[in-house]
Image (cartoon, rainbow, N blue to C red):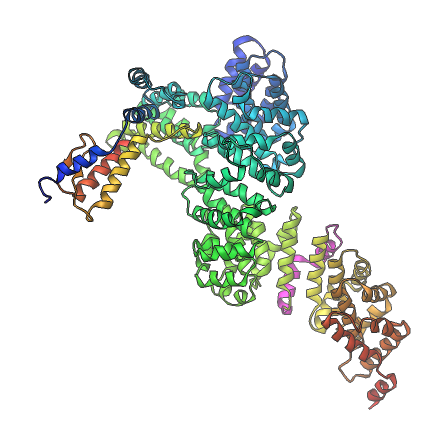
Amino acid sequence: MPTARHEELIGQLASAGDGERAQSLRYLKNCVIGNRQKKDQLAELGVVASLVRILREPSVSVADLVQACHILGSLAYGGEPCLHALAREGVTRALLDLLAKVDTPDLIEAALRALKLSVGTVKTGKNILLQDADTHRIVYLLNPVAWPTPPTSLVQAARIGQQAALFIARCSGSQTLQTRWFSTQATKELLLLVGCGFVKTQEAALEALANLCHDNHAVAHAISHSDETVAPSESSVDVLLRMLQHPDAYIRLLVASCIVNMSRMGAMTSYAEKIRLSLLPTLIRLFDCSDKRVEEQAPLVFAYLVGEDAELQTSACETGNTLLAIAAVCSLQEECRKKAVDAKVLPRIVSALSHYSPRVRTAACMCTRSLSRSVKNLRTSLVDADVATPICKLLSDPSPEVQSMALTTLCNLTVLDQNIIPQLVKLSTSEDADISMHAMWTMENMVYHAGRDVKSAVMVVLTYDRLITLIRTGNVSLQERAIGLLRNLICGKEADVSSVLEGVGEVTLLSILDQMLQSKHEKVLLQTLYIAVNMATGNEQHKQSLMENETILHGILNCLEHSNVSIREGAVWCIINLCWYEGRKREEIRGARDRIQRFRTLGVLERIRHLADDSNLNLRERVATAIDQLSRPLESMEGISTE
Amino acid sequence: MPKPNLTEQWEQRLSDVDIRKTELNRLVMHYLLTEGYKDAAEEFARESGIKPAVEMEGIQERLQIRQAVQRGDIEDAIERINDLDPELLDAQPDLYFKLQQQRLIEYLREGKLPEALAFAQEELAQRGEENPALLEELERTMALFAFADASTSPLARLMDDAQRQRTASQLNTAILAAQSLPQNPKLSMLLRTLFWSQQQLDGKATYPHMTSVVDASLSGVAASANSAAASQHMDASTE
C-alpha cells in the first residue's frame, strides 16, 4: 500500500468527525495485525502520536477507544520503529491514565491488553514508573467478578484478570516494583486467580506470582504463609503443590517455577520432603514435553532449584532420569559430575549446543560449565567429546544470552584454538560489561602458562594499547581481568617479561603498577602485585626498575600487612624474587646483595618476622625463605662472586 | 472363536456400568459447542433442559469465522478474528501465515492470477524470508501457478474444500485455546480411549470387540486389523 494512503488514514484519525475516524481506526487495525512491515511503516509516519491523542481526548466513544487500544497493542509486536514510537509517545502512561477513569469491560480489557504489550518483557518492564494509584487500580482490575457490577460474561472477566496479571508479571523485574505490588495486595488477589479455572488466566496469575517472589525474601515468605486461596481449607502452598499434578504442562511448569523461587528464598523449608518427592520428579518429566515453552524453560527452573543445594542434587541424580537435567545439577558435587559423565550425557549436551532453541543452547552451555568444574573432566571427557568446538561457534550466536553463556563456559575450558581470538577481541569491546569481562577472562586463561606464540597471537589482535585502555577503565571486574591478562602475559621466562615491557612500554607499565598498587579492590591489587612478582623474575634491569620507583616499592611492602593472606603472600614472593640469584654472574649477585641491603635498611626483615607465626602454612613457608635470604651475610655473597 | 454366550455375558456386564442421562447430554452439548454448532446447541439446550456453560460464549462469532473460511472469504474471517481476539494473529504468526496462504489459494481458485501474484509479493514473501519452514510451504503453494488447471495438478489437495476445512479447524482450535475454552470434544476423546483400550487388550484376552463407533456393534473376536481401521477413521473425522 502506498505511503500516501497511510498518511491519509492517519490524517483521518485527527478528524473527530463521526464515522470517518471509526472507519480509519478499523481499517488501520486490520492493516497492522499480523503484518510487521506495515506496523513499522505506520509507526514511522507518526500513527502512535495520533492514537495517544485519541486516548487523551475527552468524550471519545468507547468503540473508538477500544480500536485505538487494539492498534497500539498490535504495534507492540512490531520492530524498532514501533518500539521507539511507543516509548517516545508515552503510551504506557496514557493507557494507565485511561484505565483510571473508565469502567466499560470491553474498554478495560482492550486497554489492559495494550498496556501489557506496551511494556514489552520483564527486562524492559523493569524501568516502568508506577504510582500507588496505578498499582491500586490494576490490582482492583484483577478480579472483575468482585466488582460492584461485574461483567456479564465470565469469560471476559477471566480475560480482564489475565491481562492485568500479565501486566504485573512484566512489571516485577525490580525490588521496587515487587514491593509496590506486594504492598497493594497484588499477591493476595493473584492467589485467588490461580484457582479460577480459566487456564490462560491461571497461567498469567502464576507467572506474576513467580516473578513477584523471584529474589524477593519478603514476598516469597508472605506467599508461603498465605491462606488466601479459593479453597477455604487449603493454604497457598497446598494449592500450589496440588497443582503440580495439573493436566496442563505449562501450568505445571509455572507452578514449579513459583515454588522454586519461594524455595530459593528459604520460604519452603518445612516442605523439603515434598519438594524432593513431588517437585523434582515433576520438573524432570517436563524436560520431555511437547510444548516448546516448557521444554525450554524446565531445565532452567530445575537448575535454579538445585543450583545451590547439594542434597537436592543427590536426589536428582538418584532418579537417573533425563540426562540433560543431571548435567544441569552438576555444579557443586563431583559425585554428580562423575555420574553424569558415566551416563554418557556428553554427546547429548554436544548436540543440544546446536539446538534450534536459544534457551536449550543456553542450558547446554550451563551443563558444560557445571561439568567443567571438575578438573578430571576438564582433562579427559570434555576433551574427548570436543565440547570446545561447538561452544566456540556459539560465540557468534545471534542470541546475546547464548553468547554470554558460551563465553562464561569457555572461561573454564582451556581453549587452544587461536581462530576464535578475533571473535573474542570483538566481544571484549561489547557494550555489555559482562560479555566484555568474560571475553577478557577467556583470553586471560588462554595465555595462562602458554607459549610465546599463543601470547603474541592474542596480542596482535587485541593490541597493547587496547589492553592499557581496559586496565584504566572504571569497571573493576573488567579491570581485574585486563590486569590478570597482563599478569599471565608477563609470567614465564625473562623473554616474556621483556616482550611485555616492550609492548606496554616501561614507563607506562611502571605507572600502571604505581597506580594499581594503591587500588582499594583486593582482586585488582592482587593481580597487580603478581605482575610485580613476575617482573621480579626477570633480568637485573627489570628488578632494578621496581626497586628504583619509591611508590611501587612501598606499595609492595605495604602489602605485607594487608588483611588478605593472598596479598601478604604475594608481597613476600616479590621480596623473595628480588633477593634471588641463580647465576654466577657478578652483576646479578651484586644486584641481589644491594637489594637485600636496601630491604634491611628499610626494616623489611623485622616486618617479615611479624609474619613468621601467621596461621597460614603456605605463607609461613614463604616467610621462612624470605627471612633466610634477608639475613644472609652480605660479605659471603661478595666472596662467592669473586671466585 | 469365543463361546456362544460370551457376547451375552459381556453385554450383561456392560449394562451394569452406570451412566447417567445428564452426563450423556452434557457430552453431546460439549460436542456441539466446541464444534460451533450454535443453533443445534441452543435447540438441544431447550429440549434436554441443560444449561449451556461458558462454552456458549463467542460461539456465534466462531461460527461466523468458520463459515467465512469455508466459503473462501478469508479477508472477512481475518477481520472477524481481529474483532474477537486482537492479539491472536500477532501472537501466532504461523496461524496468520496459514490464513494468508489460504487467501492466495482462493485467488487461484477464482483464476485471479495477477491479484494472486501481487498478494504473494506484498504479504507473503517477507514472511517466508523470516521463516524457512514457511518459505517451503509458500513455495509449494506458489507451484500452483504453474498449472493451467490447478485442480488436476499434483497439488490439487491444496485447492479442494478439505483444505478450507483444515484451515477452519486449526483456527477454531487456536481461538478456543486463547479463550481458555476446551479445544477438543470430550466425546472424541472418550472414543479414542475406548479404541486404545481395545488395542491394549488385543492378544491378551478374548472378548467381544467393538468394530464400529456408528452402531457400537460388537463382533465376536478381537481382530486387530479392524481396530486399526476404526481408529484411522476416528483420526480422519476429527481432523
**In the image, residue A471 lies in the stretch drawn in magenta:** yes
A33, A612: nearer the viewer = A612
- Looking at this rendering, what residue extends furthest in the left direction? B4
Residue A400 location (% of width, % of height): 57, 46
Q: Which residues fall within the magenta stretch?
A: A450-475
- Residue at the spot 46% in from the left edge and 54% down from the top edge: A324
- The number of callouts visible is 0
Q: Is residue A312 left or right of residue A97?
A: left
By secondary structure, the bulk of the magenta-drawn segment is best described as helix
Which image quadrant: the C terminus of chain A?
bottom right
Q: Find residue A81 and report its image quarter.
A: top right
Look at the image and tell me whether residue A156 can be seen: yes
Residue A438 location (% of width, % of height): 63, 54
- Residue at the spot 50% in from the left edge and 37% down from the top edge: A239
Look at the image and tell me whether residue B219 can be seen: no
A152, B61: nearer the viewer = A152
